[in-house]
Amino acid sequence: MMDLWFSERETENIKVQWKLARTLASHQSQYQKIDIVEFVEFGRGLILDGVIQTTLSDEFIYHEMLAHVPLNTHPNPKTVLVVGGGDGGTVREVLKHNIDSVDLVEIDGDVVRLCREFLPELAGGLDDPRVRVHIGDGIEYVRKREAAYDCVLVDSSDPVGPAVGLFAREFYSDIFRALKPGGLMAAQTESPLFNQDLIRQVTKGLRQIFQDVRFYWANVPTYSIGPWSFALAGQNIKGVNMSVTSGCRYYNDAIHQGAFMLPAYFQDLLK
């Protein structure tokens, strides 16, 4: 029997492969092709339009870093918005904090449905009474909010298709308006090795809106053969609260501090 392999293109000249055990679900939604698969070494995972979004083997790295860095930097986060993230992993991490409410806005309801069924380790938190799931356009949702959230977390897919607008200056401006005084936003910002033009664009857009913009990073094996980056933005980012570290498999106080220590090439990219 021939081995099954999933191939993903990193760049025009680099392709990465993962050995597949089986496909659990395959569905063409209104917006994208959704596949739930089981990898031999990385366990079950979500693939959108041929790009890996998350796997059970290493999802905790990404979700912990996207959630806990901003929430442990904000002095007292109570209201949180997650844009994207229909798999539920970021919401799961947000719920480890003493928050009052979480709004999740995911454009593709089929992603939420399939992740509830096949990836309950991520999506289980969506049933928490503090969580409200909205199926719709996150850009439009944010545009209609004003001073509503302490933290906004942008858990987007790659900047193609419906996710392109989640990397635009106009969207950042709407997030700024949706934040309460002292609020923070965080977003995944792709690879500092392979997506340098995008990071320059994001940096420029954020700095036109927010007074204080900082980047941090982590290594997420299934996302890139190099490091993965995140942006943290606010008007006056102060200290670190560190109210939550227990229950984490990657994130801790040392990781929080060290994640902002960028190598020279990344620092040069942000100038």
Image (tube, helix red, strand yellow):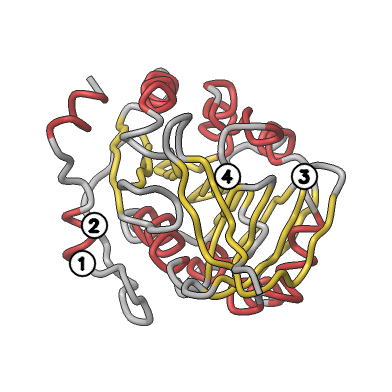
In which quadrant of the rendered view does residue 262 lie? Answer: top left
In terms of sequence position, does the residue under pointer 4 or pointer 2 come before the other? 4
Identify residue type, mark 1: Asp
In terms of sequence position, does the residue under pointer 3 or pointer 4 come before the other? 3
Q: Which tag is nearer the camera, tag 1 or tag 4?
A: 4
Indicate the secondary structure of the residue bearing disc 4. Answer: loop
Q: CA distance from mark 1 to mark 3?
A: 38 Å
Above or below, comparing residue 160 to residue 134 in the picture: above
Residue corresponding to mark 3: 32
Q: CA distance from mark 2 to mark 1?
A: 9 Å
Residue corresponding to mark 1: 253
In terms of sequence position, does the residue under pointer 1 or pointer 4 come before the other? 4
Identify residue type, mark 4: Ser
- 206 or 118, which is in the foreground? 118
Q: CA distance from mark 1 to mark 4?
A: 25 Å
Residue corresponding to mark 4: 156
In terms of sequence position, does the residue under pointer 2 or pointer 1 come before the other? 2
